[in-house]
């Protein structure tokens, strides 16, 4: 659950032009699809944790993917399920979900983990994701990065106790890229990190566009990715040798 948001904050009073923000969001959606498309399977079951009103349907197209949405505010996923945006909506808290083991091909935390980290350790969430994933499935996390200049500045504002005055909430907590990688690997997942974008949603449109070239050029380089403004962690659950063999036999049987 996010902390209370104060709309009368410095950044939203001065740097919150809707068209400028939307330019960033559109580019972010494009980059997310671009990075995930070659890593995701053609379809399956996805879980969106802390889904709110935006459960990630842009990543999991309807028809090919069935999405279960979970949120502390159960009314949101239940409403989305009733509207057909989700296949199923549930109330629940990350790290405490009563869902079956190995039930999903993808588990998504989109701009969720930094809120969790404000209140509790991240380790149980990663362990839970590993439990919920089928072999070969992906944990996907999209989070603000602490090594980017904007992330570092927000972290300092939070540390000084002026987070709400500066950007509206004390739990908009940029995360360490090393922490994301460490927690995923500690849960037994094979993790990689990408910078989705080096631009910031409040930058002037011309400056945003000028930085987009860096996203493709540097975003998937291991060292440069650490300094992204918005990060994407992609962590795959390993497939045991006997499971891989059984999968190969099943595929061979289907071809006969």
Image: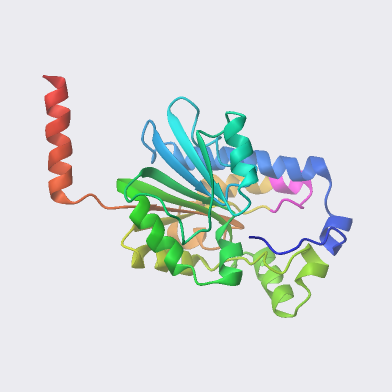
As displayed, is residue 111 above or below residue 210?
below
Quadrant into which the N terminus falls: bottom right
The residue located at (48%, 37%) in the rendering is 67
Q: Position of residue 123 (x, y in %)?
A: 43, 68
Does residue 119 appear left or right of residue 222 in this picture?
right
The residue located at (86%, 63%) in the rendering is 10
| Residue 255 in sight in this render | yes
Name the image quarter holding residue 230: bottom right
Looking at the picture, tell me which residue is in the foreground, 171 or 12: 171
> What count of labels does the image hold?
0
The residue located at (61%, 63%) in the rendering is 115
> Which contiguous range is marked in magenta?
200-208
The residue located at (88%, 57%) in the rendering is 13
| Residue 28 in sight in this render | no
Q: Position of residue 55 (x, y in %)?
A: 57, 42
Q: Position of residue 96 (x, y in %)?
A: 46, 61
Asked if the stretch drawn in magenta spans residue 203, the answer is yes
Quadrant into which the C terminus falls: top left
As displayed, is residue 243 above or below residue 190?
above
Name the image quarter holding residue 42: top left
Does residue 241 appear left or right of residue 153 in this picture?
left
Does residue 5 appear left or right of residue 81 in this picture?
right
């Amino acid at each position: 659950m996010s902390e209370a948001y104060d709309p009368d904050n410095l950044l939203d009073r001065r740097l919150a032009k809707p068209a400028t923000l939307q330019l960033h969001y559109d580019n972010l959606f494009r980059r997310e699809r671009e990075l995930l498309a070659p890593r995701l399977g053609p379809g399956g079951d996805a879980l969106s944790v802390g889904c709110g009103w935006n459960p990630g349907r842009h990543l999991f197209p309807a028809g090919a993917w069935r999405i279960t949405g979970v949120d502390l505010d159960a009314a949101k996923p239940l409403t989305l399920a009733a509207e057909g945006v989700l296949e199923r909506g549930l109330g629940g808290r990350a790290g405490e979900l009563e869902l079956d083991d190995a039930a999903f091909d993808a588990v998504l935390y989109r701009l969720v983990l930094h809120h969790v980290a404000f209140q509790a350790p991240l380790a149980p969430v990663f362990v839970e994701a590993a439990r919920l994933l089928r072999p070969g499935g992906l944990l996907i996390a999209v989070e603000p990065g602490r090594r980017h200049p904007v992330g570092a500045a927000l972290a300092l504002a939070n540390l000084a106790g002026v987070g709400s005055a500066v950007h509206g909430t004390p739990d908009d907590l940029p995360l360490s890229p090393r922490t994301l990688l460490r927690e995923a690997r500690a849960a037994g997942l094979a993790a990689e990190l990408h910078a989705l974008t080096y631009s910031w949603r409040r930058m002037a449109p011309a400056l945003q566009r000028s930085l987009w070239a860096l996203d493709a050029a540097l975003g998937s380089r291991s060292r440069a990715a650490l300094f992204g403004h918005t990060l994407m962690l992609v962590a795959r659950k390993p497939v045991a040798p006997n499971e891989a063999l059984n999968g190969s036999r099943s595929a061979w049987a289907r071809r006969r």
